[in-house]
């Protein structure tokens, strides 16, 4: 089978971008077993409750749900097992330094295949307060309305005032 080229998104964590302010993003590989890869290729993954933490000097991913592979046998994997993330030592040191400052967490933002390899996009994030969330929603709605009005004017449906 030929190796895939490009980037194919499997899952994204929209709630993370709503609940957190993303300060910096990192791309990490992930250690998987065979049936997990097959399940990922079917798109059967959920990032909803996932988070990353340090354990023994390495970054581990907790709470990631990869559904069992339908055609798997006794070799099938546990859906919510802890998975090791593959990062350079320098990146791990930088991430751990930021995490020790406090108030910052490491959340997975998306999962994708990059040139055939499973990757996770991690974000160093700070939690938003409820008024920050409302402000973000208001800005998004205002930008959407501006784009809509601009589209109408370009199409000539609404005269300029």
Image: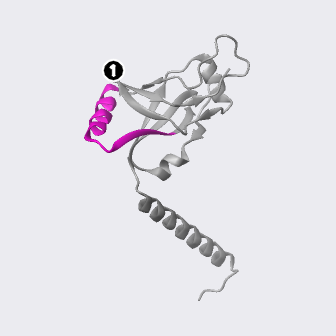
- Left or right relative to 81: residue 75: right
Above or below, 48 against 128 in this view is above
Q: Which residue is drawn at 55% across and 67% down?
A: 141
- Residue ranking furthest to the right: 71
Q: Which of 24 and 8 is in front in this view?
A: 24
In which quarter of the view is residue 76 placed? top right
- Could one spot residue 115 in this view of the protein? no
Q: Is residue 89 magenta?
A: yes
- Could one spot residue 82 in this view of the protein? yes
Across and down, in percent, residue 111 comes to: 54, 36
- Left or right relative to 6: residue 69: right
- Magenta residues, start to end: 88-109
Above or below, 36 against 99 in this view is above
Above or below, 18 against 30 in this view is below
The N terminus, quarter of image:
top right
- Residue ranking furthest to the top: 74
- Left or right relative to 60: residue 37: right
Q: Residue at x 50, y 35 (%)?
A: 50
What is the crowding at mark 1: few (fewer than 14 residues within 10 Å), some, or many (at least 20)?
Answer: few
- Residue ranking furthest to the bottom: 161
Across and down, in percent, residue 77 comes to: 60, 18
Q: Which residue is drawn at 52% across and 64% down?
A: 140
Which residue is disc 1 drawn over? 56
Q: Residue at x 33, y 20 (%)?
A: 56
Across and down, in percent, residue 88 comes to: 36, 27
Helix, strand or loop at disc 1?
loop
In which quarter of the view is residue 71 placed? top right
The C terminus, quarter of image:
bottom right
Across and down, in percent, residue 4 comes to: 62, 29
Q: Which of 123 and 149 is in front in this view?
A: 123
Q: Is residue 128 magenta?
A: no
């Amino acid at each position: 089978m030929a190796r895939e080229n490009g980037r194919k998104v499997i899952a994204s964590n929209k709630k993370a971008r709503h609940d957190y302010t993303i300060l910096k993003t990192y791309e990490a590989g992930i250690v998987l077993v065979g049936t997990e890869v097959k399940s990922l290729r079917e798109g059967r993954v959920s990032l909803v409750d996932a988070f990353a933490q340090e354990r023994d000097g390495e970054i581990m991913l907790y709470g990631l749900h990869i559904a069992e592979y339908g055609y798997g046998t006794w070799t099938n994997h546990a859906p919510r097992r802890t998975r090791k993330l593959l990062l350079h030592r320098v990146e791990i040191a930088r991430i751990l330094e930021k995490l020790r400052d406090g108030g910052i967490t490491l959340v997975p933002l998306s999962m994708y295949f990059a040139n055939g390899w499973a990757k996770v996009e991690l974000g160093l994030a700070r939690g938003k307060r409820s008024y920050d969330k409302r402000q973000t929603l208001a800005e998004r709605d205002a930008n959407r309305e501006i784009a809509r009005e601009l589209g109408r004017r370009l199409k000539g449906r609404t005269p300029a005032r």
